[in-house]
Amino acid sequence: PLRRAQRIANIEVSEILRIGARAAQLKREGRDVIVLGAGEPDFDTPDNVKAAAVRAIEAGDTKYTLLDGTLALKQAIVGKFKRENGLTFGVDQITVGAGAKQVLHNALMATLDDGDEVIVVTPYWTSYADMITLAGGVTVQVAGREENGFLLDPADLEAAITPRTRWLMLNSPSNPSGAAYDEARLRAIAQVLLRHPHVWLLSDDIYEHLIYDGFEFKTMAQIEPRLADRTLTVNGLSKAYAMTGWRLGYAGGPRELIAAMAVVQSQSTSNPCSISQAAAIEALNGPQDVLEERRASFLRRRDLVVDALNATDGIRCRRPEGAFYTFASCAGVLGKTTPDGKVLETDADFCAYLLNSHDVAVVPGGIFGLAPYFRISYATSEAQLKTAMTRIAAAVQALR
Ligand code: PLP
């Protein structure tokens, strides 16, 4: 039998992927399952971006590129940070990887020694904890309580920092809560970080463009330049431009960190796909109208889902500022009994009941570090969402 390495002893393939696999299995058995699990826009990659990729193939842009991104793409990213975030970077402060995920992985691998601590805010994207473990680090969870809008309280941050803290990971708007940090909240967090110069900030801005109700997106390096020399601002093409399969993410930060991350990438994957890089230049420099159209569509879907959930007895859902997720409490249905006699004890029980009895796949909050909640990804058609909401209401009504 295979002896797995210790470093992956406590890590599994993501639970979200497993729920997706279970849903796919039920579909193969002929069930009409609606999957609200995946963190992936249902839209297609914009045509201008696809055309740029075709041109790249035809022009022979099919070879190794510079290790952490072509110069042309790095220049496009410099332009993006300047234009959209007011951040000034040189091209040597930019790194490009196979998705924001690889960029985050590179940063953690390049900086963490065994036992170093990384602070994450619950509910957090599940991969954070596993990536930290893989890099030898220790995840320190700080509660983003619902009454606090699922956001980090600066006093809780202060209390969580130790001499071994290396990073604070912030994700705004957040997967899974959709919560976003406004300027005032970021300033309050910055005050704490300024008192602790050994703590660096990883700002995961991948949902930047999915923001609603006039909320103004800000990122830490922009509002607190004194933190810029220890902030890595991470972003990517997957969510904004519906390019999940192209695997393209990037970051801007201090030169010494960018250089250290290049070492990790150099001995793992080398450069990200040359064709995806060419496409990314077009995505960043080309027309941006598609962002606004899709945002408007996500906004309608958010309201459809939040309103339907709040109209269901026992479910309570905060209206999130951004991303394409809702994170609703199912505390009001725990302790109830399903028609086939099972008592719902946890959010995972509730989600399993929804999937097995009512053909809707959602993700339990526990895996994001905060229970009892469940996450819905509303990146699917309004028709599907309406059907799913009707099913969830029927499922809850059938409980005793
Ligand atoms: N960060 C967050 C919070 C995410 O939800 C995701 C994707 O689900 C990523 C980063 C990684 O995206 P990608 O690797 O596709 O760029």
Image (cartoon, helix red, strand yellow):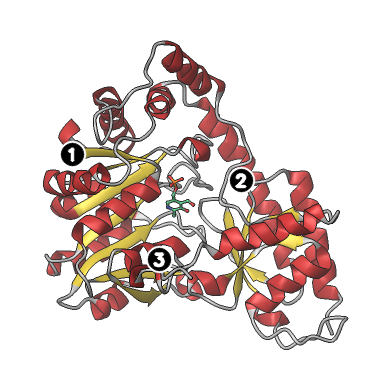
Which marked residue is nearer to the observer: mark 2 or mark 3?
3
Which marked residue is nearer to the observer: mark 1 or mark 2?
1
Relative image position of residue 47 (x, y in whole percent): 56, 21
Q: Residue furthest top?
A: 59
Relative image position of residue 150 (x, y in whole percent): 46, 68
| Kind of residue sitting beneath label 2 | Leu
Task: Look at the numbered disc 1 and say if its residue's Cβ is closer than 8 Å to ligand 1.
Answer: no
Element type where label 1 sits in the image: helix
Residue occupied by mark 3? 130
232 shown above or below 360: above
Residue 73, disc: none
Residue occupied by mark 1? 93
Q: Is residue 326 among what the camera can see?
A: no
Quarter of the C terminus within the rendering: bottom right
Q: Residue at x 63, y 40 (%)?
A: 42
Q: Nearer the viewer, residue 252 or 180?
A: 252
Disc 1 crowd rating (10 Å Cα; few below 14, some 14-19, many 20+) is: some
Residue occupied by mark 2? 299
| Kind of residue sitting beneath label 1 | Gln
User: Tag 3 or tag 1, which sits nearer the N-term?
Assistant: 1
Q: Residue at x 48, y 40 (%)?
A: 238
Task: Look at the numbered disc 3 and say if its residue's Cβ is closer than 8 Å to ligand 1.
Answer: no
Relative image position of residue 65 (x, y in whole percent): 28, 27
Q: Residue at x 70, y 62 (%)?
A: 22
Relative image position of residue 237 (x, y in whole percent): 44, 37
Q: Residue at x 33, y 53 (%)?
A: 104
| Kind of residue sitting beneath label 3 | Asp
Instruction: Please identify the quarter of the rendering in which residue 312 is found.
Output: bottom right
Q: CA distance from mark 2 to mark 3?
A: 31 Å
Q: Going by the image, does 240 lie left or right of 306?
A: left
Mark 1 in CB contact with mark 2 (< 8 angstroms): no
